[in-house]
């Protein structure tokens, strides 16, 4: 069984454990009436958005969500909650360091043996939800379940429904479908792994309702290829600023190109 299959199938049990953990960690989690910011990067940021909407809608207090690098330091919060599975996310660690002594912070992580342990005032560990697969699965949903349970919104029906969904065969023909269109409001559909998707596919995805396209791997590939070319052309280079500068420039060009593709439906920038 692959890592991702095992982790997907384990989610209902992880949710049950996360919900039970909420009561034990109530002292570390936001109290009703507090003004709270929830931060993360990538998938954790999406969970932060979901948790913020749930908390505010439930009447527990004003709640914002930000990518950790975009935290508005001019705003006042009673508590900042950071989601980081690995406990090593640079932007999260930097933010927690900047907030030390100013705003009470709590981190939810899967690995207590990482720098985040000493960076936050309080720590909630969901080590049973740690992952080995490349795609985040059970940590993200377990962290959200923890916060849902803390708000009194979690029921055992969620895990039961998940077990039913995991054990039920997919409808005939679903895996052969080449296009899905999402209609709705109040939630965001994200293309989490766009690597290998042609430009026409990205344009079609946005046209079909995708609100966010993640391109981190594509940028890493552009940077790595540029660094390799630079070192091949300049074998004498030893100053990392030279070849990393070339890599950053290549990454910036790829960002501009992708923005052009998504904004105008063209590969010309």
Image: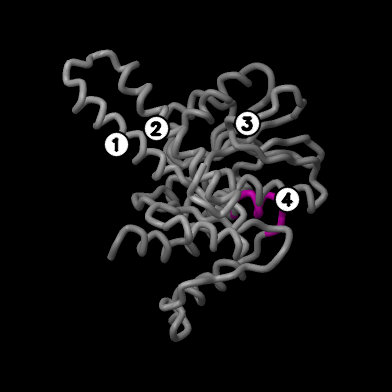
- Say which residue label 2 marks: 250
Q: Earlier in the sequence, mark 3 or mark 1?
A: 3
x, y percent for residue 62: 80, 40
Expressed as whole percent of the image width and height from the top left, the position of residue 61 reads: 80, 42
Q: Which residues are magenta?
A: 145-153
Residue 206 sits in quarter: bottom right
The residue where tag 1 is placed is 225
Disc on res. 53: 4
Residue name at image x 75 percent, y 41 percent: 63
Separation (CA) of disc 4 from disc 2: 37 Å
Contact, mark 3 vs mark 4 (Cβ under 8 Å): no
**Nearer the camera: disc 3 or disc 2:** 2
Extreme-top residue of the structure: 239
Foreground mark, 1 or 4, reads: 1
Q: Are marks 3 and 2 in contact (CB under 8 Å)?
A: no
The answer for how far apart the CA atoms under marks 3 and 4 are is 18 Å
Q: Earlier in the sequence, mark 3 or mark 2?
A: 3
């Amino acid at each position: 069984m692959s890592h991702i299959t095992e982790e997907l199938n384990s989610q209902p049990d992880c949710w049950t454990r996360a919900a039970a953990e909420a009561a034990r960690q109530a002292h570390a989690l936001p109290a009703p009436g507090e003004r709270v910011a929830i931060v993360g990067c990538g998938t954790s940021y999406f969970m932060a958005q979901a948790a913020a909407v749930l908390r505010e809608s439930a009447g527990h207090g004003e709640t914002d969500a930000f990518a950790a690098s975009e935290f508005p330091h001019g705003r006042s919060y009673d508590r900042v909650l950071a989601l980081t599975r690995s406990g090593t996310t640079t932007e999260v660690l930097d933010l927690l360091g900047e907030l030390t002594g100013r705003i009470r912070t709590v981190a939810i992580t899967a690995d207590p043996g990482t720098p985040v342990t000493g960076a936050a005032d309080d720590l909630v560990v969901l080590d049973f939800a740690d992952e080995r697969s490349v795609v985040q699965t059970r940590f993200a949903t377990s962290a959200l379940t923890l916060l849902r349970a803390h708000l009194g919104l979690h029921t055992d029906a969620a895990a039961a429904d998940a077990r039913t969904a995991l054990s039920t065969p997919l409808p005939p023909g679903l895996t052969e479908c080449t296009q899905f269109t999402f209609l709705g409001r109040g939630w965001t559909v994200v293309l989490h792994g766009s690597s290998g998707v042609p430009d026409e596919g990205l344009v079609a995805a946005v046209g079909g309702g995708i609100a966010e396209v993640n391109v981190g791997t594509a940028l890493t590939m552009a940077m790595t290829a540029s660094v390799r070319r630079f070192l091949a052309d300049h074998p004498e280079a030893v100053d990392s600023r030279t070849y990393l500068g070339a890599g950053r420039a290549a990454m910036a060009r790829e960002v501009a190109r992708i923005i052009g593709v998504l904004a105008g439906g063209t590969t010309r920038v």
